[in-house]
Amino acid sequence: MSDLETAEEANPAAETRAPPLAFRSAPLSPAPVSFDRSELREILNLYGRKVAEGEWRDYAVDFTPQQAIFSVYRRASECALYRIEKTPKLAKKQGAYAVVATGGLVLKRGGDLRRVLAVLDKRLRLVSG
């Protein structure tokens, strides 16, 4: 090997090697669905009221490529009392939001989150009579 000859010219197999792992492009997975700031504010306002009343004590948030789920628990060791789900794929058909009870029963579904959450926020009203 002379001084003018480079390492690549001396070893032609070096040019055909695959790039290092850091430079390989990975297949892109779809971005997970998430709640935006206003949706999270509505959900956490309801959650805060229910915690203050002593009904709820814990929550979990899950983000998948198909939906975002806010799960509410009475105790951390139990299964979720309710799931507040956002599924954008159903937005035009049934509405993007749903409240689902423990057994899988859909309590309310719709396109307006505030109206869907109203099923969980039953406030006492004074009835005269």
Image (cartoon, rainbow, N blue to C red):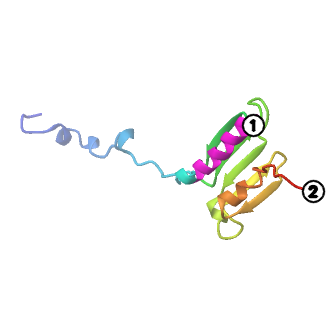
Say which of 111 and 20 sits in front. 111
Please identify the residue farthest to the right as the structure is shown: 129
Find residue 105 and name its label: none
Report the side of 2 relative to 28 (left or right): left
Please identify the residue farthest to the top as the structure is shown: 77
How far from the left and from the top, in percent, is residue 94?
Answer: 72, 67
Callout 1: SS: helix
Taking the spot 18% from the left edge, 37% from the top edge, the residue there is: 7
Say which of 23 and 58 sits in front. 58
Residue 107 drawn above or below residue 102: below
Report the side of 92 relative to 109 (left or right): left
| Number of marks in picture | 2
Q: Amino acid at mark 1?
A: Glu
Taking the spot 64% from the left edge, 63% from the top edge, the residue there is: 89
Q: Give, as a single range, the part of the protein colored magenta.
A: 39-56
Q: Quadrant of residue 55?
A: top right
Q: Quadrant of residue 57?
A: top right
How far from the left and from the top, in percent, is residue 41?
Answer: 58, 48
Say which of 124 and 111 sits in front. 124
Residue at label 1?
53
Taking the spot 64% from the left edge, 48% from the top edge, the residue there is: 43
Q: Quadrant of residue 96?
A: bottom right
Please identify the residue farthest to the front as the structure is shown: 129
Q: State which mark lies toward you, 2 or 1.
A: 2
How far from the left and from the top, in percent, is residue 76?
Answer: 73, 30
Taking the spot 75% from the left edge, 37% from the top edge, the residue there is: 53
Q: Amino acid at mark 2?
A: Gly
Kindly report the secondary structure that dominates the magenta region of the rendered protein.
helix
Find residue 129 and name its label: 2
Callout 2: SS: loop
